[in-house]
Image (cartoon, grey):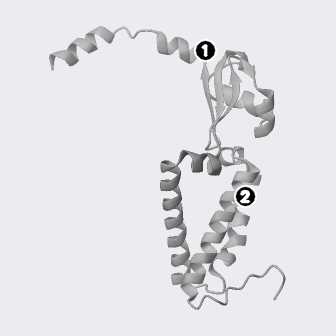
């Protein structure tokens, strides 16, 4: 047995061993994604896609061990679904746990000014930030009221243009209101 090979001889049921292995890999992946950054989640490049495919192949054997049966795979998948469902429920109920596991949103731009320290912590380059701003319809960073790196890895942007559009009254506002009151 090699130094890194883990055996679970105290478990006498192969399916319980599969469940434990699957859960160990699941929590390892959550911790690894948390350590390596949430930016990676929303902005997948070709390199990231290849990495994800290779990781999934690498951890597959670690989850099911020597059992390559359909039943073993289904048990591992069921354990992963159950763990994911349970974790999502816990994250929903506990803000503290949610912040620890997922982190919190990070302010990148406020009133046209880039928060250099937060961008550096999140490892977001100026080019990536400018691209996100353009994707949201703003011409330039100075036109952005607020840009946030969300916990899911997406960058949300609220621009001056959004504020102007949202404060203009709709020409049919009063007519629509009258129709609703008559019903």
Please tell me which residue is depicted at 55% across the width and 18% down the height of the picture: 162
Q: Find residue 133 and report its horizontal and vertical position in percent.
A: 68, 26
Mark 1 in CB contact with mark 2 (< 8 angstroms): no
| Residue beneath disc 2 | 32
* Residue 147 in picture, x, y percent from top left: 65, 27
Residue 120: give x, y in percent of width and height: 81, 35
Left or right of 47 on screen, residue 138: left
- 161 left or right of 37 in image: left
Indicate whether 51 appears above or below 3: above
Question: Crowding near pointer 2: few (<14 within 10 Å), some, many (20+)?
Answer: few
On screen, residue 77 above or below 88 = below
- Cα–Cα span, label 1 and label 2: 37 Å
Q: In the structure shown, which secondary structural element does the residue marked by tag 2 occupy?
A: helix
Q: Residue at x 29, y 8 (%)?
A: 174
Disc assigned to residue 160: 1
Q: Residue 179: where, in percent of width, then height?
A: 21, 15
């Amino acid at each position: 047995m090699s130094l890194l090979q883990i055996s679970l001889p105290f478990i006498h049921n192969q399916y319980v061993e599969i469940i434990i292995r699957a859960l160990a890999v699941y929590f390892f992946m959550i911790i690894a994604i948390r350590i390596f950054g949430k930016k990676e989640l929303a902005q997948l490049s070709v390199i990231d896609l290849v990495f994800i495919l290779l990781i999934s192949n690498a951890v597959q054997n670690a989850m099911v061990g020597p059992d390559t049966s359909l039943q073993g795979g289904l048990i591992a998948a069921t354990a992963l679904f159950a763990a994911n469902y349970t974790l999502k429920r816990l994250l929903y109920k506990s803000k503290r746990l949610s912040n620890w596991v997922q982190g919190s949103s990070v302010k990148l731009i406020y009133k046209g000014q880039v928060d250099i320290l937060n961008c550096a912590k999140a490892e977001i380059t100026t080019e990536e930030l400018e691209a996100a701003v353009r994707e949201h319809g703003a011409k330039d960073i100075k036109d952005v009221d607020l840009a946030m790196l969300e916990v899911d890895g997406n960058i949300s942007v609220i621009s001056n243009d959004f504020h102007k559009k949202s404060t203009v009254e709709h020409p049919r506002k009063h007519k629509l209101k009258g129709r609703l009151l008559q019903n």
